């Protein structure tokens, strides 16, 4: 089959790799119908992730149709259309029973396409093996398109969790750092909690424009210190809650500097560095609450599905490009360089 493989910084290739097959009785093989390039894929693309096998198949965002199941799979049949989360979990270990599937002891916190724990081939391919398929796969309701459902496996669930963890109350002011795909879906999610205003902080004009269309007040970091800009628009106090959706030291620090005293910072940006500067003094004397961590997306696929069906969440608004799998290297390039107004690049095998 055709798949996207990584061979070094900036070097992704379309190559022929072995077809996936059933290895364990709980496996399923999916024929992929849609995959995508995620912002966290860029960490690998930039060479910032150590320990990856050469030629690893990239991608952890995907959905598809069941082609084959192992003998222990009970809930899926050939032809079922399903979505799976980005992280691989067994469903029965201590951490999975605590609703922390990203900490799964059985898989070693594995993610499709590498990075953590045991390395499983990713979803930027024509097919994929999904372990623990009964637990991992959620059937897609009839009448919903791939594009509507797709982001539940990662970035919509992540954006929602970021907003939920921020403890937003009706009438609050909220600021979001990062107008990329996760930040834009966090913006949609934040509106579910009834804030009076939501600010979007970024420096890319076309992304800020879409954020404004989705109901945010744009704040461009190239026009001044974002904390000062946010205080100027909140009577000097700062937002009640700040959502950090980038995963770098600068926006994390700016989020802590921006939030009001007694406020909450919720961070879901993926950090690849083992350590970074932390403005502990600022956080301590402001009596802040900090919530951060990787999203347990498996927990949110089913609960968020009705919000999409009802039109309360419109994840398709962030899609800017849909291209064949064979054009994926170009998709990485334009997404990385923010060319051609790219926000979310979808892939079709």
Image: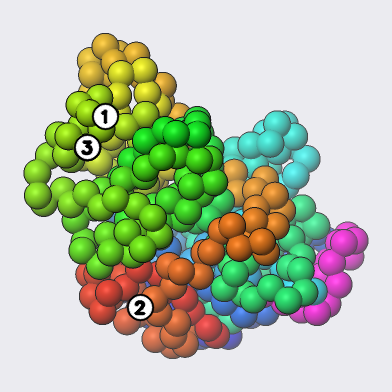
Q: Mark 1 or mark 2, which is nearer the start of the sequence?
A: 1
Q: Quadrant of the N terminus?
A: bottom right
Q: Which numbered disc covers residue 233?
A: 3
Indicate left or right for 252 with 67 as reference.
left
Q: Nearer the viewer, residue 147 or 168?
A: 168
Judge whether residue 68 is colored magenta: yes
The picture quadrant where one finds residue 236 is top left
Indicate left or right for 115 with 342 as reference.
right
| Residue topped by disc 1 | 238
Q: Position of residue 66 (x, y in %)?
A: 76, 75
> Which element type, helix, strand or loop, lies under badge 3?
loop
Q: Nearer the viewer, mark 2 or mark 3?
A: 3
Magenta highlight range: 64-79
- Is residue 331 something that shows in the picture? yes
Q: Nearer the viewer, mark 1 or mark 3?
A: 3
Q: Quadrant of the C terminus?
A: bottom right
Judge whether residue 76 is colored magenta: yes
| Residue topped by disc 2 | 331
Gap between marks 1 and 3, in whole Å?
Answer: 8 Å
Classify mark 2: residues with Cα within 10 Å, few (<14), some (14-19) or many (20+).
Answer: many
Residue at screen point 25% across, 25% down? 237
Q: Nearer the viewer, residue 254 or 75?
A: 254
Q: Nearer the viewer, residue 130 or 253?
A: 253
- Is residue 258 something that shows in the picture? no
- Here the colouring is rainbow
């Amino acid at each position: 089959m055709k798949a996207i493989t990584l061979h070094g910084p900036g070097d992704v290739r379309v190559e022929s790799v072995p077809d996936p097959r059933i290895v364990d009785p709980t496996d399923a093989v999916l024929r992929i119908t849609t995959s995508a390039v995620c912002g966290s894929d860029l960490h690998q693309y930039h060479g910032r992730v150590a320990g990856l096998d050469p030629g690893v198949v990239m991608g952890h965002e995907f959905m598809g149709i069941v082609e084959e199941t192992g003998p222990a799979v009970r809930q899926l049949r050939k032809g079922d259309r399903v979505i799976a989360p980005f992280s691989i979990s067994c469903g029965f270990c201590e951490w999975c029973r605590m609703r922390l599937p990203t900490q799964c002891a059985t898989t070693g916190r594995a993610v499709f396409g590498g990075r953590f724990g045991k390395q499983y081939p990713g979803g930027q391919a024509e097919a994929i093996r999904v372990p623990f398929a009964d637990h991992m796969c959620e059937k897609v309701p009839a009448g919903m398109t791939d594009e509507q459902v797709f982001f539940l496996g990662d970035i919509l669930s992540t954006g929602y969790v970021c907003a939920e963890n921020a403890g937003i109350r009706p009438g609050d002011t909220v600021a979001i750092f990062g107008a990329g795909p996760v930040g834009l879906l966090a913006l949609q999610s934040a509106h579910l909690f009834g804030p009076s205003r939501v600010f979007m902080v970024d420096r890319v004009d076309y992304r800020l424009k879409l954020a404004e269309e989705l109901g945010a007040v744009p704040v461009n970091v190239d026009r001044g210190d974002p904390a000062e800009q946010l205080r100027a628009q909140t009577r000097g106090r700062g937002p009640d809650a700040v959502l950090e959706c980038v995963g770098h030291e600068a926006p994390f620090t700016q989020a802590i500097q921006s939030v009001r005293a007694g406020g909450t910072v919720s961070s879901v940006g993926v950090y690849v560095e083992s350590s970074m500067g932390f403005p502990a003094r600022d956080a301590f004397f402001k009596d802040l609450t900090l919530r951060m961590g990787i999203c347990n997306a498996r927990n949110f696929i089913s609960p968020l599905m009705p919000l999409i069906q009802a039109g309360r969440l419109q994840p398709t608004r962030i899609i800017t490009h849909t291209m064949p799998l064979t054009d994926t290297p170009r998709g990485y390039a334009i997404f990385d360089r923010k060319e051609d107004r790219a926000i979310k690049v979808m892939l079709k095998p």
